[in-house]
Image: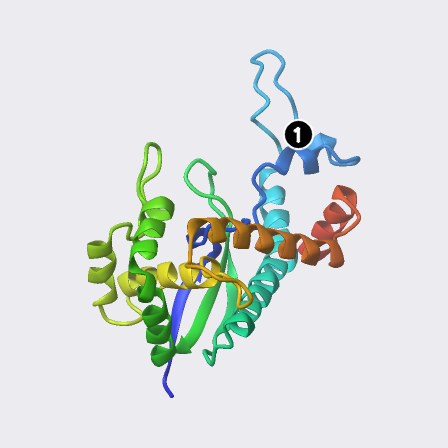
Amino acid sequence: MKKITIETGSAMFHLYQPGLDGLEEEFASLEGRENDWYHDTENNDSANYQGEGDWEIDGKAYLEKYLVPNWVDAFKETIEDRIKRYKSSIKIKIVPTGVSSPREYNFETDNALFNIVLSLKDARKIKDEVFKYQDEFVQYLHEYHRSRDGFWSYMPYTLPDWAGRWEQEPESDGWDRAFVCLFEFWLFAFPGYESEGKPSLENMEGSIEEFRDTFDRYLEESKCNGGLEDCWRFVEAVAQ
């Protein structure tokens, strides 16, 4: 059976992002790294720092060798768990492909890149399951993907927009984004197999929290479980 590949990344999902943003100052304050940073007391400017090139190299290594693999493993476990809950015959493969880090963090954060591989038949099965609850799916699109002040959405957030993209050629950018919406809803909004009721936004919130716990567990069990100092030693080791 022919397989299709959806090229996507963690930024398309409303999950715990495997990012570096917010950690720079903590890493830079570690013993032996203080000289990489300086505080311009005359201009009261703490945003400037030295060694930016080194930081970018180390940061990329940290993402690729540590955060992203754990994020992908947690995502795989979540998918496997849902398939077991639904007693589903759908077969899905997740293939990590790298990491994308923006130069500035004003529009986006670090993004784990991966492919979702499955048959077109299974993709349509997911669509059929979701559309048994079309009203709930429309509510999800509006709540999770609509544009709002300070945020311009590139995802479909109305049913006509979603349907127009789904009608495009499979594996096109528009079709991929339509599938990601289906997949996220199917993965997180449906109740577990021992639960009753319809898919809901409340289920989404609870399932996403479960994912965060799974991701945290992978981080704790990985090489970098001794706090920031061990993380920094790991970054330096893999960057060499």
- Residue 129 lies, with reference to residue 8, above or below; the image says below
Residue 82 as seen in the image, left or right of residue 231: left
Q: Residues within 10 Å of mark 1 (few under 14, many from 20)?
A: some
- Circle 1 SS class: loop
Q: Nearer the viewer, residue 174 or 54?
A: 174
Residue at 56% in and 26% down: 47
Residue at 53% in and 55% down: 207
Tell me the quarter of the picture where residue 54 sits. top right
Q: From the top left corner, tell me how far across and down residue 33 is, in percent.
A: 73, 36
Q: From the top left corner, tell me how far across and down residue 67 is, in percent.
A: 62, 54
Which image quarter is the N terminus in? bottom left
- Residue 155 lies, with reference to residue 74, above or below; the image says above
Q: From the top left corner, tell me how far across and down residue 85 is, in percent.
A: 54, 70
Residue at 54% in and 51% down: 206
Q: From the top left corner, tell me how far across and down residue 98 is, in percent.
A: 52, 61
Specify the amino acid type for callout 1: Trp
Q: Is residue 223 visible?
A: no
Residue at 44% in and 43% down: 108
Residue 5 as seen in the image, left or right of residue 96: left
Q: How is the image coloured?
A: rainbow
Q: Is residue 52 visible?
A: yes
Residue at which label 1 appears: 37
Q: Residue furthest top?
A: 42
Q: Nearer the viewer, residue 224 or 85?
A: 85
Q: Residue furthest bottom?
A: 1
Which image quarter is the C terminus in? bottom right
